[in-house]
């Protein structure tokens, strides 16, 4: 089976379980993925969904952090946040900085031996990044 089929199957499972809606800020421990178009962005997204599905952290939308009110940002500042970026463009990190959030854990996938454009979002790579995220 192609890795993209595995991802589609995972997403179908994810979307038929409890999290049909956005869960932004729904838990004290949250994870935000860059969810970029690159392979490493897709891995960030899949790892975040796995963390959310397993109730390790609830996934929040990076776009919300870029667009929400200052009041909502102040609420987010009270949470344990993990940001996962795919590469050193650091989209998630930059949005955190722009919104004045400095207290968060951070994982940049390309810092861990993965190369943007050469890292298929297959089960092995997703699992490897997931394990790194669980240590944060
Ligand atoms: S951090 Fe890299 S992979 Fe993620 S959205 Fe930005 S450019 Fe894309």
Image: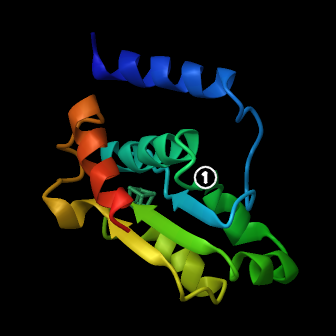
Of 104 and 98, the residue lying toward us: 104
Q: Picture coordinates of residue 118 (x, y %)?
A: 17, 43
Quadrant occupied by the C terminus? bottom left
Give the colour scheme shown: rainbow
Residue at 54% across, 26% down: 11
Q: Picture coordinates of residue 38 (x, y %)?
A: 36, 46
Q: Is residue 90 left or right of residue 64?
A: left
- Residue position for label 1: 59
Of 83 and 27, the residue lying toward us: 27
Question: Tag 1's secondary structure?
Answer: strand
Q: Is residue 122 visible in this depiction of the protein?
A: no
Quadrant of residue 4 in the image?
A: top left
Q: Is residue 106 visible in this depiction of the protein?
A: yes
Residue at 66% across, 75% down: 79
Q: Picture coordinates of residue 84 (x, y %)?
A: 43, 62
Residue at 49% across, 68% down: 82
Quadrant occupied by the N terminus? top left
Q: Quadrant of ligand 1?
A: bottom left
Of 45 and 17, the residue lying toward us: 17
Q: Picture coordinates of residue 15 (x, y %)?
A: 65, 26
Crowding around mark 1 (Cα neighbors within 10 Å: few <14, some 14 to 19, many 20+) is many
* Residue 93 in the image: above or below residue 19: below
Q: Is residue 104 left or right of residue 78?
A: left
């Amino acid at each position: 089976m192609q890795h993209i089929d595995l991802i589609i199957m995972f997403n179908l499972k994810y979307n038929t379980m409890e999290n049909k809606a956005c869960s932004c800020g729904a838990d004290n421990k949250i994870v935000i993925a860059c969810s970029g178009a690159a392979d490493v962005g897709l891995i960030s997204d899949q790892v975040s969904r796995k963390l959310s599905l397993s109730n390790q952290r609830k996934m929040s939308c990076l776009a919300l952090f870029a667009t929400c009110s200052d009041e909502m940002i102040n609420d987010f500042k009270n949470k344990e946040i993990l940001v996962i970026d795919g590469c050193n463009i650091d989209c998630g990190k930059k949005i955190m900085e722009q919104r004045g959030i400095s207290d968060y854990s951070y994982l940049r996938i390309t810092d861990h031996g993965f190369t943007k454009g050469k890292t298929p979002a297959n089960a092995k790579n997703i699992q490897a990044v997931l394990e790194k995220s669980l240590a944060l």
